[in-house]
Amino acid sequence: MNLSIHFTLEEFTRSVNHPSIDNSPSTEALDNLYETAAGFERIRSVLNKPINLSSGYRSPKLNSAVHGSRYSQHCKGEAGDYTAPQFGTPLQVCRAIVANAEFIDFDQLIFEGTWVHTSFSENPRREVLTAHFDSGRVTYTKGLP
């Protein structure tokens, strides 16, 4: 099922590491996924390259299995983690998104080192963060390196 011209529901709900967990979105999450896919279309338009989505929607059970935050926008169908190797590094992707923030209108953009996290919401904050990983703990600083 297509959520947009370049993104499918399967892409936004697949779980490579936990394929046995039911990751079917609720009606509300599915509605949000259409909006999130539209946001990812804007990112793809700016990058002019394909996006490799690694994590989109997460059911509560899947989110728990991957040790995600219980407040994660992934659980609402509002976020995705991805790379765009044909465009450049995750940091280069983040910089392109920041440069086009008004057009993309994201809620959160997080440089996660080896991937990018972007979320969308009704009231976008355009918050830009960098994740720091230390001994299994994640902290965030504002901005990009």
Image (tube, rainbow, N blue to C red):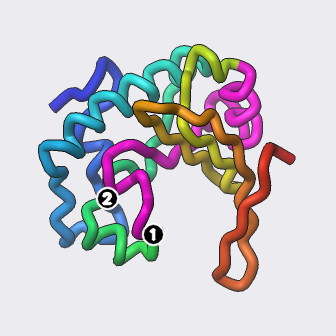
Residue 2, percent from left and from top: 21, 27
Number of residues whose C-alpha sits closer than 10 Å to that of mark 1, classed few (under 14), some (14–19) or many (20 or more): some
Indicate the secondary structure of the residue bearing disc 1. loop
What's the residue at 23%, 39% (across, down)? Answer: 9
Number of residues whose C-alpha sits closer than 10 Å to that of mark 2, classed few (under 14), some (14–19) or many (20 or more): many
What's the residue at 45%, 45% (across, down)? Answer: 80
Q: Do the residues labelled 1 and 2 touch (CB within 8 Å)?
A: yes
Task: Tell which of 67 and 1 is nearer to you.
Answer: 67
Please determine whether, in this image, residue 73 is positioned above or below residue 53.
Answer: below
Residue 91 belongs to magenta span: yes
- Residue behind mark 2: 58
Q: What residue type is labelled 1?
A: Gly
Residue 140, percent from left and from top: 72, 61
Based on the displayed image, in which of its 4 quarters is residue 64 positioned? Answer: bottom left
Residue 131, percent from left and from top: 71, 59
For this orientation, the residue located farthest to the right is 145
Q: How many labels does the image show?
A: 2
For this orientation, the residue located farthest to the bottom is 135
Please determine whether, in this image, residue 100 is positioned above or below residue 32.
Answer: above
Q: Which amino acid does label 2 sit on?
A: Arg
Indicate the secondary structure of the residue bearing disc 2. loop
Report whether 144 appears left or right of 80: right
Task: Tell which of 79 and 54 is nearer to you.
Answer: 79
Please determine whether, in this image, residue 23 is positioned above or below residue 46.
Answer: below
Report whether 8 appears left or right of 54: left
Task: Tell which of 1 and 34 is nearer to you.
Answer: 34
Q: Quadrant of the N terminus?
A: top left
Based on the displayed image, in which of its 4 quarters is residue 143 positioned? Answer: top right
Please determine whether, in this image, residue 37 is positioned above or below residue 99.
Answer: below
- Residue behind mark 1: 68
Give the magenta-colored segment's residue range: 70-99
